[in-house]
Image (cartoon, helix red, strand yellow):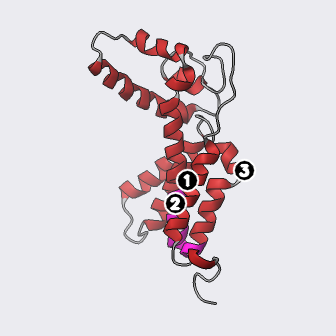
Amino acid sequence: MQRGSLLPGWTRGHSIVVLSLIVIFGMLSRSAPPEESAGDPVSSDRYRPVAAAIGLTPEVPHDAALATWMNTALYGVQYAATAVRSPGMSGIDFCASFFRDPQRFCAPATLAALLACSLSVILTFTLVTRLMDPIAGVACAFLVALHPASVAFTSGIGSGAFSLLFLICGLLVAVTLDWREGGLPAVVAIGLSL
């Protein structure tokens, strides 16, 4: 059987185009409009990783520690950029915008999670293509992007998207490492990612 003959029609030899479509549909499947929640956004499970990241609550959800760390870095940079544009703004003013419109305030965290999911799909394709072939890479990327369990695990601003990204990064570094020569930085990178 000829390589690439398992894919239908125009997709043979166009795995990058198919991968792009998979990434787009994967992002669309994770960007459904959230349900409206009346009440305190700090106590909402949906917004708690961001609320913990900006210091509004000491409670970090048990499954969102990684997302809280990532959001702390993201919102720290956003606060610094906002403080440069508006020198008189305090940290309290910055955090007050969370209460005015939590969905809009959490948009950078949502975009960061979507970017992590997209990178996970692309790195999955790269990993499996390196191990097997582009056909298997497309199939695995499709599963990571659109399988209902994967979508449920990586949707929202929790740690799922970042955990998947770090796991796949660690596996990709492990596959590309020449174990005969072995470099300490690469082994450390694998350990930290995993």
Outermost residue, right side: 148
Q: Can residue 94 be seen in this view?
A: yes
- Few, some or many residues within 10 Å of mark 2 (<14, 14–19, 20+): some
Q: Judging from the image, what secondary structure is the residue with disc 2 in? A: helix
Which residue position is annotated with label 1? 24
Q: Is 90 rendered above or below residue 166?
A: above
Outermost residue, front side: 10
- Provide the residue span drawn in magenta: 121-135
Q: Is 156 rendered above or below residue 126?
A: above
Residue 2 % position (x, y): 60, 89
Report the side of 135 relative to 192 (left or right): right
Name the kind of residue labelled 3 in the image. Pro
- Residue 47 found in image quarter: top right
- Disc nearer the start of the sequence (3/1): 1
Q: Can residue 194 be seen in this view?
A: no
Numbered mark located on residue 20 in the image: 2
- Few, some or many residues within 10 Å of mark 1 (<14, 14–19, 20+): few
Residue occupying image coordinates x 42% and y 10%: 93
- The rendered magenta stretch, by its main secondary structure, is classed as helix
Which residue position is annotated with label 3? 148
Name the kind of residue labelled 2 in the image. Ser
Residue occupying image coordinates x 49% and y 54%: 169
126 is within the stretch colored magenta = yes
- Disc nearer the start of the sequence (3/2): 2
144 is within the stretch colored magenta = no
Q: Judging from the image, what secondary structure is the residue with disc 3 in? A: helix
